[in-house]
Image (cartoon, rainbow, N blue to C red):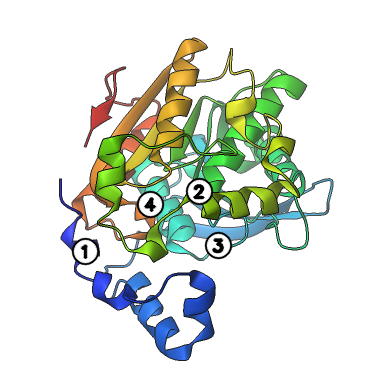
Amino acid sequence: MPIHPAVASNFHLLEGIDSFEAGLADPVTRARMDEFMSHRGAPPPPAVDVRADSAPGPHGPVPVRIYRPTDGAAVRPALVWLHGGAFVGGDLDMPEADWVARQICDRAGAVVVSVDYRLAVGVTYPVPHDDVVAAVRWVRDCADELGIDPNRISVGGASAGGNLAAGATLRLRDDDTWLPAALLLAYTTTHAVVPPPTAALSELMQQVPRLLRFLPEDRRRITTNYVGGAESRADGYAMPSNAELDGLCPVVLLNAEYDDLRSSSETFAAQLAVAGVDVRQVLFRGMLHGFLNMPATIEPVHRALGLMAEVVIGTPSLEMAETSA
């Protein structure tokens, strides 16, 4: 399927910008990048109750933002959610964090806890990983106080946040003999070195501007910054494809059709299947990496959020085989 027009129609704004660093350094190109990333006229996300809190962690308190529906239901399912940003960017206000949390809170009638983990800027793994483990433990251990059904806690994230969600879940499986109800991963990567793309994916990616690509040199820079050295230093909690995956909870992967990192997610799905894990993946056609930063009025984003809500509720209407949306 062609790249969705909501994205492709704005590619001209990125012409001549080859890196975020270079683009942000020039006021003119930065304005063009900001325009590309903005979604003027998008309707506001659902209104829900929001409050700040923090979870105790080994590196200090971990800030969280708690989203709760406005009605009076006492006990709800929950999602612990982690934004992306290549381990060095992103925050609780970005659409992938705030919009997604509000949508899932509203659609699933769920408590969503969005985690402001420490970024790999001046620190490296395991600090962000430790923050996420601490936040999930806090949600689990404070389920009664938070009005959460302890048996219906899901963990999820997008891009780097998906990596952190999977790594934290593996740690909790091993250290606490505890697993969430489901693991929900959007356009994530779990490999220190991304597996080579298929010929079909390589051909598709030729249509994507360089700024929006994840070429091997980009991924190498992201990985080495996160783990604090060579890719070979990454253990199974830093890069979950290196882990023993047996006994993991059900996993749902949401992949973007136009995404260099899709080969990592698809390979991870195969590894999970070999390990006997209940794994399901959905390919969102016409979408690029990061599509959860787009408004829910865009149909593939609407469908993705609907699927995520179903997983959190515990009633995903998916086939076990790979599905396209």
Residue placed most toward the observer, 266 or 253: 266
Q: Residue at x 40, y 56 (%)?
A: 213
Residue, disc 1: 8
Residue placed most toward the observer, 240 or 296: 240
Residue, disc 2: 216
Give left or right: position of 196 versus 52: left
Q: Earlier in the sequence, mark 2 or mark 1?
A: 1
Is disc 4 placed on a helix, strand or loop?
A: loop
Q: Residue at x 40, y 30 (%)?
A: 266
Where is residue 154 drawn, in percent x and y? Answer: 52, 32
Give left or right: position of 141 versus 208: right
Which callout, 1 or 3, points to the residue nearer the camera?
1
Q: Residue at x 84, y 46 (%)?
A: 58
**Gap in angstroms between the C-alphas marked 3 and 2:** 22 Å
Residue, disc 4: 289
Where is residue 310 drawn, in percent x and y? Answer: 34, 33
**Gap in angstroms between the C-alphas marked 1 and 4:** 13 Å
**Dot 2, how many residues are within 10 Å of its Cα: few (below 14), some (14-19), or many (20+)?**
some
Is disc 2 placed on a helix, strand or loop?
A: helix
Residue, disc 3: 90
Residue 240 numbered mark, or none: none
Q: Earlier in the sequence, mark 2 or mark 4?
A: 2
**Dot 4, how many residues are within 10 Å of its Cα: few (below 14), some (14-19), or many (20+)?**
many
Above or below for 53 versus 265? below
Q: Earlier in the sequence, mark 1 or mark 4?
A: 1
Can I make out residue 312 in this image?
no
**Gap in angstroms between the C-alphas marked 2 and 1:** 23 Å
Q: Earlier in the sequence, mark 1 or mark 3?
A: 1
**Gap in angstroms between the C-alphas marked 3 and 4:** 14 Å
